[in-house]
Image (tube, rainbow, N blue to C red):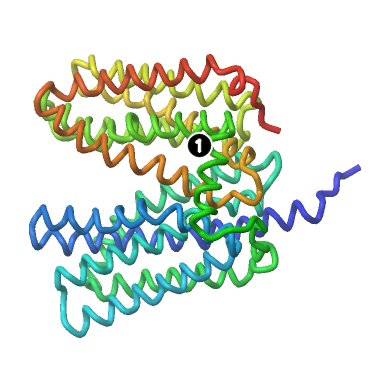
């Protein structure tokens, strides 16, 4: 006899599929636009290009907690629609301004800041959608699909941005980004019945709500522990591929292609784990897997620090990528399942801050340290910290006992 799937489960999958497609289009447009802004800023020099990038990151970091509080107060759908409409206006207005007055540095900085403000409200609300549309045993697969879409957008977006800038200029690229937000808003209109949820009933102003969200994370042993591991991964794993691998390749006088192979091997390792989770779902003992993933990633970083050739470095970063993938694919679903319903967006906002702040700090510190002690020493230091974090996670009885449904 053929099993009949519950109507709610089928509707949930269809709804999440619509969301995944719409958000992927929006991410692709934003990634292309981000490249275009950076490219335009490089015409004024490296320092000004860095300022434009910082102008996007700083508002996101400073306003993320406020964005999470607003999303929990008014519901994720309203915040996503408001943020999407605002970004549509910003990108369309930017295209019109460039067409009228040309490219100007103050205009680039202003638009970058507005993009950062919009993302501070959009990201915490978007992070809760999977809980509303794909709760249950399939959450791990749903989050893996979201990671695939995000990585694909990050990979294809800059190339698309380059083609758009070459063919249509900054005006055309901004218009394409605006169109991507129209697609997202259309998807949100379709999903209103499932996402237009009432806000949380807890009283107090926004500052009180922000404090309450931080308090929930600080008071819950599981959320607190997972947040600490996320901070370690953000601060000591993410800089390896983005900053330390190129520095290490230059230090060792390897060909530039070695850096490309090493970074690509890391991405391949992460991608293979994401695809495995997409097909099979998360492991039953998620806490053990994510802590073990940190140990594997730390071992890969340690091997990288000792690598004597480009191929060995690529093999090491592949191992690092496998561990990173195991961690990222299992920590996200655990965090969402452990979050109280009325605090979903605020906890996502806290995690956004926990990821962004350490990364901004360590990128600058590691660059300074690598100039003095060598990139291999910095990578070795990262390996030690990440391995210690993994051992700490395995030593936690609370984390070891956590299991996925």
Q: Between 114 and 203, which is closer to the camera in this rendering?
A: 203
* Residue 160 percent location from the top left of the image: 31, 60
Q: Secondary structure at mark 1?
A: helix
Residue 312: tell me if it is visible.
no
Q: Say which quarter of the image contains residue 175.
A: bottom left
Residue in the picture at 10% in, 29% down: 371
Count of number-bearing discs: 1
174 sits left or right of 68 in the view: left
Which quarter of the image is occupied by the C terminus?
A: top right
Q: Residue furthest bottom?
A: 100
338 sits left or right of 147 in the view: right
Residue 300 in the image: above or below residue 220: above
Q: Between 134 and 255, which is closer to the camera in this rendering?
A: 134
Q: Say which quarter of the image contains residue 139.
A: top right
* Residue 189 percent location from the top left of the image: 60, 72
Disc 1 crowd rating (10 Å Cα; few below 14, some 14-19, many 20+) is many
Q: Residue furthest right?
A: 1
Q: Say which quarter of the image contains residue 144.
A: top right
* Residue 152 percent location from the top left of the image: 41, 49
Residue in the picture at 60% in, 49% down: 343
Residue in the picture at 32% in, 29% down: 236
* Residue 31 percent location from the top left of the image: 34, 58
Q: Between 70 and 230, which is closer to the camera in this rendering?
A: 70
Residue in the picture at 10% in, 62% down: 43
Residue 61: tell me if it is visible.
yes
Which quarter of the image is occupied by the N terminus?
A: top right
141 sits left or right of 309 in the view: right
Residue identifier under label 1: 274
Residue 118 in the image: above or below residue 58: below
């Amino acid at each position: 006899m053929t099993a009949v799937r519950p109507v709610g489960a089928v509707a949930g999958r269809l709804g999440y599929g619509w969301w995944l497609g719409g958000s992927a289009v929006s991410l692709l447009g934003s990634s292309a636009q981000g490249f275009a802004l950076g490219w335009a800023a490089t015409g004024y020099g490296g320092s000004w290009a860095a300022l434009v990038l910082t102008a996007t990151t700083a508002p996101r970091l400073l306003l993320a907690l406020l964005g999470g509080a607003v999303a929990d107060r008014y519901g994720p759908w309203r915040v996503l629609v408001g943020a999407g409409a605002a970004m549509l206006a910003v990108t369309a207005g930017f295209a019109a301004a460039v067409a009228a007055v040309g490219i100007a540095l103050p205009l680039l900085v202003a638009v970058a800041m507005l993009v950062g403000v919009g993302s501070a409200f959009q990201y915490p609300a978007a992070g809760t959608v999977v809980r509303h549309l794909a709760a249950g045993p399939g959450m791990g697969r749903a989050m893996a699909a979201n990671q695939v879409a995000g990585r694909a957008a990050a990979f294809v977006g800059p190339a698309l941005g380059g083609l758009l800038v070459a063919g249509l200029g900054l005006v055309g690229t901004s218009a394409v980004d605006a169109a991507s937000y129209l697609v997202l808003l259309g998807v949100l209109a379709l999903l209103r019945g499932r996402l237009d949820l009432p806000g949380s009933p807890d009283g107090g102003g926004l500052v009180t709500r922000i404090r309450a969200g931080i308090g929930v994370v600080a008071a819950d042993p599981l959320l607190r522990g997972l947040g600490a591991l996320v901070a370690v991964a953000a601060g000591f794993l993410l800089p390896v591929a983005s900053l330390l691998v190129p520095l290490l390749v230059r230090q060792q006088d390897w060909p530039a292609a070695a850096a490309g192979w090493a970074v690509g091997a890391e991405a391949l390792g992460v991608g293979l784990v994401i695809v495995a989770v997409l097909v099979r779902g998360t492991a039953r003992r998620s806490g053990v897997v994510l802590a073990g993933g940190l140990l594997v990633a730390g071992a890969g970083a340690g091997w990288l620090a000792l690598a004597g050739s480009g191929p060995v470095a690529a093999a090491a970063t592949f191992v690092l990528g496998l561990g990173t993938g195991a961690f990222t694919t299992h920590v996200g679903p655990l965090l969402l399942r452990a979050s109280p319903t009325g605090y979903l967006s605020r906890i996502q906002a806290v995690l956004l801050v926990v990821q962004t702040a350490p990364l901004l700090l360590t990128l600058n510190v590691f660059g300074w340290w690598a100039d003095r002690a060598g990139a291999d020493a910095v990578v070795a230091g990262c390996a030690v910290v990440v391995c210690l974090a993994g051992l700490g996670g395995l030593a936690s009885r609370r984390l070891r006992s956590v299991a996925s449904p």
